[in-house]
Structures are given as structure tokens and as C-alpha cells.
Image: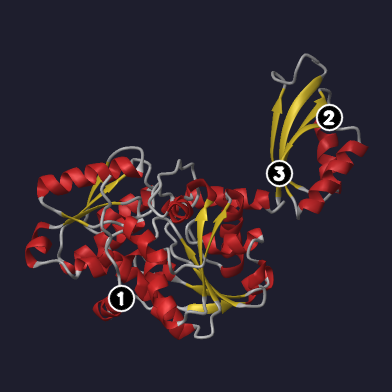
Amino acid sequence: MKNQSTARVSLSDIMAARSRLNGSIVRTSCTESAALSELTGARVFCKQEYLQRTGSFKERGARNALAQLSAEQAKLGVIAASAGNHALGLSWHGRLLGIPVTVVMPRFAPLVKVARCRQFGASVVLYGDTFDQARGEATRLAEERKLTYVHPFDDPQVIAGQGTLAFEILEQVPDAEAVIVPVGGGGLLAGMSVVLQALKPDLQIIGVEPANAACFAAGLAAKAPVRVATRFTVADGLAVAEAGRNTLAIVKDLTQRMVTVEEESLALAMLRLAELERCIIEGAGAAGLAALLEGDLQDLAGKRVVLLLSGGNIDPLAHSRVIERGLAADGRIYRFDVLLSDRPGGLAHLSAILADAGANVTEIVHNRTFAGPDLSRVHVLCTVETRDRGHITEIQQRLAQNGVELFGKES
């Protein structure tokens, strides 16, 4: 098979992008978080890219690509396949620049992102159940309508735009010792790595991706894009099956470390950010904190670490479900099954035990039909609010001491 050529992105390309973006992109804050520092043991600084107009860093690459279109290309318009944030960036800046934008999204794309793209004036096409299917349709439409295709992460102009974020970090936290970068297809990691390795080579660059879609680490190991089987992840912005050819070529000699995070850690990180930083962050944006919480980066203890809170675009209902999952992972919601005597007072007896244990009941499902062959007993599924995992253990002990049979549990 013939090798495909790759495009390089230089420091001068990213410096030019920074000048090009001046005044059109928000210079977001990068503040130290006392709460997250205490939680993780590192000195944590949060780069708040979720405060961009469209809620993510993706505006940088989108604007840089749009600003370099020829007059003819700008007149005809651009098209992209995106699950959300890249589409939002193109839609918003396309409107500002008067450039028609078409975005192709998978049918499962978050409703909030679909609605906002349309609000910004883009033409939204919902096609397929996967990103690959959406991308195939976008490629077909680009050829049919003579539109310029703007790749969400492997376009050199997009990579250069994303890399501008690194200049801000170096100015805002000049003594930073590590930066943790969320990774999907690798556009942000590639652009930032070029800048950081050139200007501060002793700074650790750590890429983090969900274990359910770890395509970039696979690509680095194989030294070429590798298609991986992705599973559902709350970090939907990082759910990419194959890393970019250009991004891998750029990163392979620059980034020092890649780690993966599990879904439970992502949910817990989103909970911690909501509670401690009082900000709504999508799964992709919480990946850096998730990596610190998992404990694989203990060597960063005491060091100045920058977390990229890369995006905050998440449907409120989806966010509430993830927060509940995070509470469960934190031992603050406990659900369990018991069999009770189907006589008056049985449920009151259970309630009294839980009240004495200081557990707040949020839901009880009382079921006679599926309680098994013993007609004298009833199956009860109970959900309670708890303080921590130690509190859960205490509840289990009290139930056992009071003769309540616990035959299944989920925490």
C-alpha cells in the first residue's frame, strides 16, 4: 500500500494563527484551584476553555481555517463532520465571517449542540449512527456541492489554531511543570506539543483519552493510524475510532506520555468540577482531572499542573445522569435489594433501620410479583443518599443485624 504524505505544522504556523485569531477568540483565564489542588495533591491550574463563545477550544482551529479560505471558497462555503464542538465553532465563526457552513452530525449528536448550530445559522444534516458514517456523507456532499471540507482534527490549519492555546498557558502559568491534554483525534495535542516543546521542552505533556476510545495511544504504538473498536463514553467529544495521520506524525516525537481513564473516573471528575469549581464541564473537558483522580499520575504530586477544561457543552439531562453516576462512584448514592416480610409494618421496619443509620431514602420500589416463590415475602429495591462508602458499610451491617436479607446491591 502506498504511504500517504503528512502535513507538518511549525511553530511559525501557530504564531501566525495567533495573530490571525487576535480579537476573535476569548483569552480564557487559567486560575489556580485550591480545592482541586487539595483533592489531587498537585498544584492545579484550570485553563477555562469552556468559556469560549461556543463553549469549547474548537473555535480556535475553526476560525483559523475559515480565515484562510480564498474568496471563491468562502463564497461556496465549508462543510464538516462533527459530533458537536467543531461544528459549533465553524457555525459561529462562519456567521461572523459571512461564510455558509454545513455540518453533518451523527443522529445521536447531543440535541443542545444540534440546536445551537442551527441557531448560529448553519445547515445541519443528521446522518448515520457513527462519526464515520457522518464523515462519509460530508465527503460526498463536499464533492457534490464543491464545498471546502474542514476536518475536525487532522487539518493543518485547525491544528495550528488549536496550538495557540499553548502560548496563553505559558504566559499565564510560566512556571508550569506539566499540562494534561484531552485527546480524541489529536488536533489539540499536536498543536500544543509543537509550541510547548519548542518554548519549554522540560514541561511534561500528558495526553489523556477514554479507555473506551483509546485510538491515539494505539496509533502511536503502531506508528500509523489504527482503527479501534469504540464503546460508549461520557467523553463523547473524544470518541474517535482512528487518530489523524497528521496529528500522529506531529506528536510521535513530541509528547512524552499517554494515559487512559475509565468511565467511572470521568463521571467522578465531572461531579468534582461541579461541586468544587462550580462549573458544568462535559466529559472530554473533565478527562484531565479524571486522570489525576485515577492515581496513575502520582509523580505529579506537588507540581504545578495545568488542566485543560476544554469544553462545557453537555445536555442538562445528560449532565444530571452523569452526576448521579459520579455520586454512586463516590459512595453517596446506594441502591440495594432486600426481601421483606409481606405483612403490615415490614416496610416501616426497613425505613426505621435506614433512618437510624442516617440514610435519606430517595426511592423505594415495592414488588410482590417478582419476589420469588415465597408468597410471604416481597421484593424491595431501595435507593438512599449516603455520606461515603464507610456509611454504606454501616448500613449493610445494620440491615444484617436487624434480620433484613440483602441479596443484591449496587453502589
| Secondary element at image label 1 | helix
Label 1 is placed on what type of residue? Answer: Ile
Closer mark to the observer between disc 2 and disc 3: 3
| Secondary element at image label 3 | loop
Question: Could you tell me which quadrant the C terminus lies in?
Answer: top right
Task: Please tell me how many numbered marks the rendered image carries.
Answer: 3
Q: Is residue 207 left or right of residue 269?
A: left
**Gap in angstroms between the C-alphas marked 2 and 3:** 23 Å
Residue 369 visible: yes
Residue 193: mark: none
Closer mark to the observer between disc 1 and disc 3: 1
Look at mark 3 in the image and give the residue it sits on: 411
Task: Looking at this view, name the residue that lies furthest to the left.
Answer: 72
**Gap in angstroms between the C-alphas marked 1 and 3:** 47 Å
Residue 14: mark: 1
Residue 55 visible: no
The image quarter containing residue 63 is: bottom left
| Secondary element at image label 2 | helix
Q: Are marks 1 and 3 in contact (CB under 8 Å)?
A: no
Label 2 is placed on what type of residue? Answer: Gly
Q: Nearer the viewer, residue 122 or 249?
A: 249
Look at mark 2 in the image and give the residue it sits on: 346
Where does the image place residue 114, in percent across and percent down from the top left? Answer: 32, 50
